[in-house]
Amino acid sequence: MTKPSGIAVKFSRVSRHFGAVRAVDGVSFEIQDGEFFSMLGPSGSGKTTCLRLIAGFERPDAGNIVIHGANVEGVPPYQRDVNTVFQDYALFPHMTVSGNVEYGLMIRKVAAAERRRRSQEMLELVKLESMGERKPNQLSGGQRQRVALARALINQPSVLLLDEPLGALDLKLREQMQEELKALQRQVGITFIYVTHDQGEALSMSDRLAVFNQGRIEQIGAPAEIYEHPATAFVAGFVGVSNVCTGELARRLTGSAQAFAIRPEKIGMIAVPEQGPDGWLSITGRVRVVTYHGATTRYAIALDGGGELAVMQQNAGDGAVFANIGEPVKLTWSRHLNQPLAEGT
Amino acid sequence: MLYLHPKLLLALLLGPPLIWLGVIYLGSLFALLLQSFFYIDDFSGNIVREFSLATYEQLFTRANGDIFLRTSVMAAAVTAAAALIAFPIAYYMVRYASLKVKAALYLAVMLPLWSSYLVRVYAWKLILAKEGIVSWFAERMHLTWLLDAVLSIPVIGGPSLSISYIGSFLVFLYIWLPFMILPIVAALERVPASLTEASADLGATPKQTFRKVILPLAFPGVVAGSIFTFSLTLGDYIIPGIIGNSRPFIGQAVYQFQGTAGNIPLAAAFTVVPIVIMAIYLTIARRLGAFRAL
């Protein structure tokens, strides 16, 4: 590891094109040392290519990448102080679990006894201490995922790259692994760069995240910042559910054509004759769809005069539905909850 | 109604091929084995259908031992060379070639198999003959001295390439190469590219990755290919008859004993030899773990 500069990874106007496809298009960001940083975006948005650029599997067509103060231009993957947990885990099928975990140490010619000791340590860390002699194909998906993690962490990299590591797991296991990964990151204290298309995962695990779209970063920030203050319509729509109001609808609600986003859970629903607090926006409509989600109920409200808003209500009391399909309601919310959006996407 | 009786359906479907395999294939092999324990009456030239080891006594003479050795060494050399040439081609086809180039390479590998084997062997005769393409080319490039030097190597050399072990070796190699390339391609296709990246990611140089990851995973393919090239070379009697120094291979000996000499028991005993050699070879391959990944 070179001298710690406080910045683990830095991209300066990095581009990577595949023919006419601009997979990564002039992207710049800085990732702090010890940070849990997520790259969130739909498939094909460039997040995985960014990860592969850091690992060294791809080379940038323009811009430069600095890892711990050193420009990594032309440095092959095997000389970079980063390790990757692959989406398909990429465990070596002809080696045992221990063999897989020890691989990096074997390559660096660490003595066999030392190797065994440290791989045992790693397997304990990921709670697989009794699985060392198994072959990867004798493990479940979650166990393979942990082997991949142990295999990467044993090399004590300065940065760990994770490419949708939980994508292949079922929901229950995924939630459990999310917690374990986060705890593990706090324990080992190294920088995690985590690629995912699951916004819930990115919000709950990250210190900061970058939202990718079409090879560019739409917004970088802490989870709450991204969720509460989305900068663009894309971020508002991709991270959680948002009502994006533009043009005529925006003018009817606020008197200005400035586009804005409003989260469904921020909108209050009252009976038509009632009045919301002073200064709040209000608009009437009829219930078009009611969907019950257990903890919440979601409504689609067709507004009088056109347009539709999604509204979400907590089922805190007796869980009775506020309004049925076809019934008139009034929607109201404080104007300052509107998130003005940048033009464009 | 047949689907209500799955066992009957299975028997009906599997029966004919099993009978074919059991009676025609294994049966004839067994008959062959049986024949080798009969012997020829020296005086009348008739086959005596009594159990005897007399034929095997005849088999293990010095001259026949040379034939076994010659054939086995040739088969081993052809197999080793085929693996060395086939691996890079297969690796390129799987990892680097675009879909179009890959299809073209597949075609290039398979195309020779569609034309007559005899035509191809005779074509090589013209290439390797004394006034053939190779010596013409050597002359033009002022490399005749090199060709002469190669031909003057004891044992494998000869008066011309078409009358030497080098010649038979080259033609064997050419004819059987597709049988080595295709299984290696199949094996490499099953090695995900992410394994190579994972290895590099963990600090392995391309050379280390090749040795620790790619080669072990492609090894079953190499063994499968080597079974083809080795056994095909062991049994072939046409190539050494057309191109070579007229010292007999196993196949030629079998051909000669069952044909002109009419010594069916000895011919049968001769064919048992490659079966035993292949059995030994497969046992070694199994020990090396070649079938673990199948």
Image: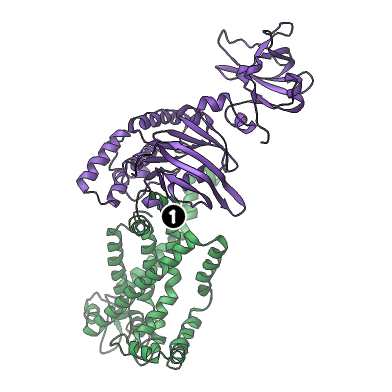
Chain colours: A purple, B green
In the displayed image of the protein, which residue is found farthest to the right? A305
Quadrant of the drawing holding the C terminus of chain A: top right
Q: Residue A281, how many percent across, how many down? A: 70, 14
In this rendering, the answer to whether A109 lies above or below A329 is below
Quadrant of the drawing holding the N terminus of chain A: top left
Q: Nearer the viewer, residue B14 or B70?
A: B70
Label 1 element class: loop
Residue A130 in view of the camera: no
Q: Residue B202, how many percent across, how many down? A: 35, 48
Going by the numbered disc 1, the residue's amino acid type is Gly
Q: Residue at x 29, y 46 (%)?
A: A102
Q: Residue B216, how many percent across, how many down? A: 34, 57
In the displayed structure image, the side of residue B257 where residue A239 appears, left or right? right
* Disc 1: which residue: A74
Q: Chain of mark 1?
A: A
Count of marks placed on residues: 1
In the displayed image of the protein, which residue is found farthest to the left? A113
Q: Nearer the viewer, residue A82 or B85?
A: A82
Q: Residue at x 28, y 51 (%)?
A: A108
**Label 1 packing within 10 angstroms: few (<14), some (14-19), many (20+):** few
Q: Residue A16, how many percent across, how many down? A: 54, 50
Q: Nearer the viewer, residue A248 or B111?
A: A248
In the displayed structure image, the side of residue A242 where residue B82 appears, left or right? left
Residue B165 in view of the camera: yes
Q: Residue at x 72, y 12 (%)?
A: A329
Quadrant of residue A46 in the image?
Answer: top right
